[in-house]
Image: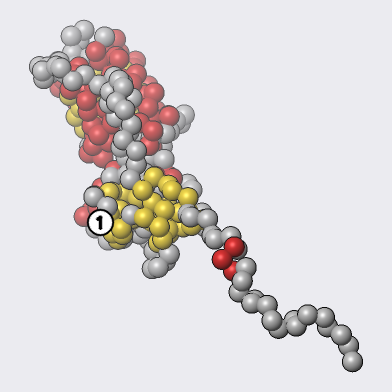
């Protein structure tokens, strides 16, 4: 008979249980705008778009929103985390959405005679959202052309001079494009000393918003012959049957823009250049 020594069944198998390590608490992460997380109970994934009290609102790729309580129960890149309110940072020098020093002690300035013209309503709304503070401080009005094809007619009516300069922001201003030919003609025309036409390389102002801000890696490539905005909405799975759908899509994109950091550098420099020109 084999001798097993002391009774091998006499010890308590749970005796060491209380000494075993407990799981580490989830890492605390501030629920800042655009942070993409997954709520573990429902599996809903989305970017942080709002906070109110102890609640956080997430918006998924298709624009659907859901509200959850802050705290544990979220995954960030597969890691369990606890969402907390962002830390309120001590205010230093105030900055406007464009990154310029915010002016807080001024009264509204009477509008200058000079103007900045952009191609359409969406361009104007984006410029206003990011540079609106700067433009009001400088007394600069932004108007839209409904397409750069009307530029020559608009300039003849406006009659720019030394005290009424015009800056123009054009879409798709690349070599060989229709826009570049129109810009070249204007810059050789009778108002060339008082007009500056600059542009960005994007087909539409939508592309000047960093694609990551709406949860995609890059803007869809739309085949020739298809309206670009409709093609983009179709590729992203967004409604695009009529102009109301396109307007809703733009508001979704514009809603993800807060500061200059949300825009591509190719647009930033051109707008700053125009503001400098019309306020010189």
Q: Position of residue 221 (x, y in %)?
A: 47, 49
Residue situated furthest bottom in the rendering: 1
Residue 235 coordinates in the image, percent (x, y) = 41, 57
Quickly name the residue at label 1.
Answer: 245
**Residue 110 visible in the shown view:** yes
Compared across the picture, whether 28 is left or right of 186 comes to: right
Under tag 1, what secondary structure?
Answer: helix
Q: Which quadrant of the figure has residue 103? A: top left
Say whether residue 250 is visible. Answer: no
Of 202 and 271, which appears nearest the observer? 271
Residue count near mark 1 (Cα–Cα under 10 Å), binned few <14, some 14–19, many ≥20: some
State how many labels appear: 1
Write the residue at 33% across / 45% down: 85
| Image x and y of residue 218, in percent | 47, 47
Which residue is more in the foreground, 16 or 274? 16
- Image point 48% across, 55% down: which residue? 25
Query: Which residue sits at x=75%, y=81%?
Result: 8
Where residue 207 sits, quadrant-wise, is top left
The C terminus: image quadrant: top left
Q: Residue at x 60, y 74 (%)?
A: 14
Task: Tell me: residue 107, above or below residue 58.
Answer: above
Q: Image quadrant for the N terminus?
A: bottom right
Check the image and name the residue furthest to the front. Answer: 6
153 sits to left or right of 30: left
């Amino acid at each position: 008979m084999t001798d097993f020594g002391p009774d091998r069944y006499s010890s308590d198998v749970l005796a060491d249980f209380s000494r075993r390590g407990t799981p580490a608490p989830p890492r605390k992460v501030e629920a800042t705008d655009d942070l993409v997380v997954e709520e573990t109970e429902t599996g809903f994934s989305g970017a942080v778009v709002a906070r109110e009290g102890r609640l956080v609102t997430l918006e998924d790729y298709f624009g659907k929103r859901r509200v959850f309580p802050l705290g544990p129960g979220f995954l960030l890149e597969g890691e369990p985390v606890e969402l907390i309110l962002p830390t309120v940072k001590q205010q230093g020098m105030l900055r406007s959405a464009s990154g310029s020093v915010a002016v807080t002690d001024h009264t509204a300035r009477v509008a200058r005679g000079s103007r900045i013209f952009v191609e359409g309503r969406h361009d104007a709304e984006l410029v206003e959202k990011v540079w609106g503070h700067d433009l009001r401080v400088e007394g600069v009005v932004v108007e839209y052309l409904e397409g750069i094809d009307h530029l020559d007619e608009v300039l003849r009516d406006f009659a720019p001079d030394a005290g009424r300069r015009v800056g123009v922001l054009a879409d798709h201003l690349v070599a060989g494009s229709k826009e570049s030919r129109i810009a070249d003609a204007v810059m050789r025309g009778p108002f060339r000393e008082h007009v500056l036409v600059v542009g960005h390389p994007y087909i539409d102002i939508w592309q000047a918003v960093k694609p990551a801000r709406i949860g995609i890696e890059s803007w869809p490539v739309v085949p020739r012959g298809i309206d670009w905005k409709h093609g983009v909405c179709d590729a992203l799975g967004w409604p695009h049957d009529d102009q109301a759908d396109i307007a809703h899509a733009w508001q979704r994109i514009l809603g993800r823009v807060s500061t200059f950091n949300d825009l591509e550098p190719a647009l930033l420099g051109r707008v700053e250049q125009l503001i400098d020109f019309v306020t010189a």
